[in-house]
Image (spheres, coloured by chain):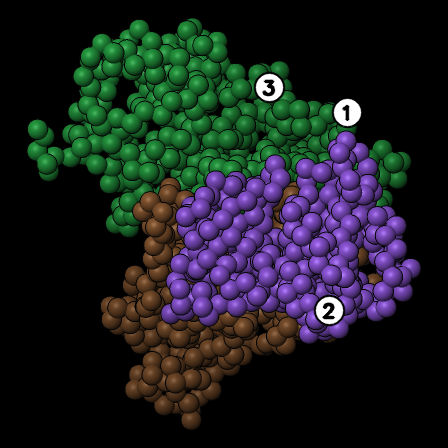
Chain colours: A green, B purple, C brown
Amino acid sequence: MNDATQFEPKILAYVCNWCTYLGADLAGTTRLEYPPNIRIVRLPCTGRIDFNLLVKAFEVGADAVLVSGCHPGDCHYTSGNYHARRRWILFRELLDLLGFDLERIHFTWISAAEGKKFQQVVTDITEKTRKLGPYTELYAAAPALAKDLPQPQSKPFQLQTFATENKLRAEARKLLAEGTVKVVIGYGERGPVLVTRPEDADRLVWNNRSTANLAMYLKRKEVNALGKAAIVVKACDERSLVVLEKESQFERKDLHVIGMACDGMEQPRCANCAVRTPRFADTTVGQLPDQTPTPRPGKLDSLMEMSRGERMAFWVQEFDRCVKCYACRQVCSMCYCERCIVDKNQPISIDPAPGTKGNFAWHIARAFHLAGRCIGCGACAQACPVGIDLGLLNMQLARAAKKHFGYQAGVDPSAELLVGAFSQQDKEEFIG
Amino acid sequence: MANIYKPELMEVIAVRQQTIDVKSVALRFLDPERARTFSFQVGQFGIFSVFGYGESTFNICSSSNWKDRIEFCFRKVGRVTEAMWKIEVGDVIGFRGPYGNGYPMDVWKGHDLIFLGGGIAMPPIRCAIWYALENRADFGEITVVYGARTVADLVYVDELAEWAKHERVRVVTCVDPGGETPDWKGDIGFVPTVFERAQVSSKDPVVLVIGPPIMIKNTLPVLRKMAISPASVYTSLENRMKCGVGKCGRCNVGSHYVCKEGPVLTMEHLQQLPLDY
Amino acid sequence: MSELITESKLRQLAGEWISGGRRVVGPVRIKDRVLYRPLQSPEPLLIESTPGGSVRPANSIKEFFFPKLETLYQYRTRGRNIELIEPAQEFAEQLIIAARPCDAAALPILDHVFNWDFADDFYNRRRAATTIVTVACSVADESCFCTSVGLAPDDARGSDAILLTLGSGRYEVRCITQKGRALFSGKTETSEESGKAAPAPERKFDPGKIRAFVDGHFEDALWAEHGRTCMACGVCAFSCPTCHCFDIVDAGAVAGNARVRTWDTCQFPIFTLHASGHNPRALQPARQRQRILHKFSIYPEKFGEILCTGCGNCVRNCPVGLGVLNMLTEIQHGQHL
């Protein structure tokens, strides 16, 4: 008998029905003993495993999570496990940034014939987790650990000439007067404006406050109802258009793109700017050659240099301020779902309440749903009323996309989308 | 501390399936003292909840004269009602209420009553009908015109038959054209049309009409032709609700808070409100 | 004759209040923002706005009376038995230091709705347990419009005590209520000087004109013209001192078997969405209209008060530069009237 005071870890396993579940069955029918600490959740395929289920496992008190499915090439649905693998590669990086203990998250391929392997894996994980102890650091508030990040320097802005602004207004006036477009989505004095009459073209401005990514208006029913639109974009914003078009959110012929050459807007992301003139615009105003950015260590590097516990304490402190205003989602051009997952209640997948669990679950979902899609416009972080460093979540995933797949969102219109695709060569050194 | 959001615990004493997606439930208070002191006015609503799933707003569709129970009727459409669909006799659910205003029975006293309802709108009418039948001497002729899309969508079918047996009560049941079955003996047509055909003659009646907006819209001209003033025509509004006590800010139609100053109001009043519902 | 206190004395007192076990809240710098946050020590407390800095915190003090997340009760199921577990009955004493007049004045305004026939004791008990010490504004910016809604930079409405700057880190202390006196009695020095506030920003609109417009123009092109750029987030409502709409959520076992109240806003698309799929306010212009209607017509009709203190948070924080002010000034000056 076990010592009554010995810690018994709780392990939650998400397994696919066709391989690992049958492998577990085989372990049972061939009388291979394995620890009773494991609770198995059966799904049709690893490809169906929503990443937020991993987080949920910890939310309900698991000390470790196992995700297991068919070997690559053996998936009952042909490619479900390839999709899963690609997502896991990226998702681990996000969890790492947030300070989750990756030692408590396990991925394996276990086939229906591998009863022995199932027994081995479960025994190993149970013992390993027993040594790690209960997962008390999850979402632990540790004010002493939470450190501030250094604020980056931004590049000084060269004031654009008035000639550029006038050219923009003239173009807008012409497009509206000729009826080529019904609305011009552009920058106004106070914020974005939707100009529908040629005589209102003077409301458009072009200055160092034209930082917003106006592609966010392409998802709005109220704007689409007006008719064909012209949109003012900088080269960085244009990458949103590349992604959105690739994701079939608009037809290129239905949008008139007015591209503005831009020399920087004093935003942190401007330091990494390489392409300064939009490449695919119908009308281009101004011309600036490409440049080589000098990347310098920023907040993300500082954060990744901290210990895991410090990182989690940092995020607990950040998310403590989140009020679930969803400004981050609303201003994002790529957040265009008719009904966001956090607003759905059959079932409630993401706790909508602004407590610790709900806030972590939301920001993990938001960041991961943008994996390989976010173009780094920074609108989310800028919109946040309480100054959460949201951009770091997206940046981590963008780095992971670059590191593991050589992929950058919105750059190459002919490249296939990252998370929707997979390769049989995707690396799996973390999978057992 | 008085917790105005805390529900009372109710035991389910009866569950009745009315249609393929509608059930009616009867409840009694777990606390016998509360059962003794509780009272409400027909027309008021309650917020019923399934613990673990959430709360939902329904009219209390039983007569206020019934002291041993309260009833509500719901259609299975979302998270809470899907959970409610599974409740059985003996289960415990939550109840907050009674909220809102009721039908002004003191104003309706002495008048003929005309009840017009469509589909799932029968429950808020049902309580008023039972109340009127139980206080028969207070009211004149009673006419009920009730219709649904198909025969299978009619609720409280047995009670409709029972009401027709009472003195000076006329019940007309109808289904939309195409919704009839081969053995359907009732009327065929939309409620406003069937109502007009019914040629109800009454001097100064009170009308309660509840149903989908299109039904109400088409009923008003018929009432006008009968020279019934909008001040004598009542309806019960519904809107999305959460708190039921006027604080969460979501159920207002213009400045009219459905949970506090409604849901019962006259057509005259409704026509003054903005199109915010 | 007036009462005077120095900034260092005020910080020393704050330190005593904190170590004495009260929850003390005040404006602090968080990265590039200033927010009201509970204080662990008096050092980070920002008493006044610095010239060129932010005029007021980007959030409001309502979260200390009406938190973003409030557990209404928990439930425990044992077979068919349900037990309801009420939250703690006692609310710890709170002290808010260096609130702005536009924050303090919001509380008497909110008292109406939280006590409209049904008394919300979660709110009321926190009100009773909190003392608000306001600092009169010495600067205003173009988003401020307190004077348009009947307030002023030195208005003491809702405050238990108000501090007016005398310059050089000294403040005149005016105790308004018993709570204020209890806090400061014996802690101040008498003085001949009188503090003053910033000159009042000029009035930008007449609330009467606004109300007449919204009451008579439920359908008007203005709502779309000016509401179309709104991105339907909750920043304005959540940083507003007077917005009070909320949701009641029951997320089951995973969320701790509790029914909770969370902030909600009429700007969210699903705010008025019926289970049937019908949405009375299906597009953003209708939601923007509701905001103005609620604050400038409905609340005044019900309770005799405008549901706005002119703090300007909505204007400053809006990710697309909206907030209520542009619509209000357009109504004031537009051709509609």
- From the image, state whether disc 1 or disc 3 is nearer to you: 1
Amino acid carrying mark 1 in the image? Lys
Label 2 crowd (10 A; few <14 / some 14-19 / many >=20): some
- Viewer-nearest of labels 3 and 2? 2
Residue B204 in sight from this viewpoint? yes
Outermost residue, right direction?
Answer: B225
* Contact? badges 1 and 3 (CB < 8 Å): no
Kindly identify which residue carries mark 3. A412
Instruction: Tell me the subunit letter for badge 1.
Output: A
Query: How many circles with numbers are drawn on the protein?
Result: 3
Give the x, y percent position of residue C41. 29, 63
Of the pair B247 and A88, the residue shown nearer to us: B247
Do tag 3 and tag 2 residues touch (Cβ < 8 Å)? no
Identify residue for label 2. Answer: B139
Left-right relation of C44 to A277: left
Amino acid type at circle 2 is Phe
Amino acid type at image mark 3: Asp
Residue C59 can be seen, yes or no: no
| Residue A337 pos. (x, y %) | 60, 34
Which image quadrant: the N terminus of chain B? bottom left
Q: Establish if C36 lies above or below A195.
A: below
User: Subunit of mark 2?
Assistant: B
Instruction: Please tell me which of labels 1 and 3 falls first in the chain.
Output: 1
Measure the alpha-carbon separation of dots 2 and 1: 68 Å
Q: Position of residue C310 (x, y in %)?
A: 60, 68
Disc 1: which residue: A253
Q: Looking at the image, which residue is at 55% across and 72% down?
A: C116
Q: Quick check: A368 above or below A320?
A: above
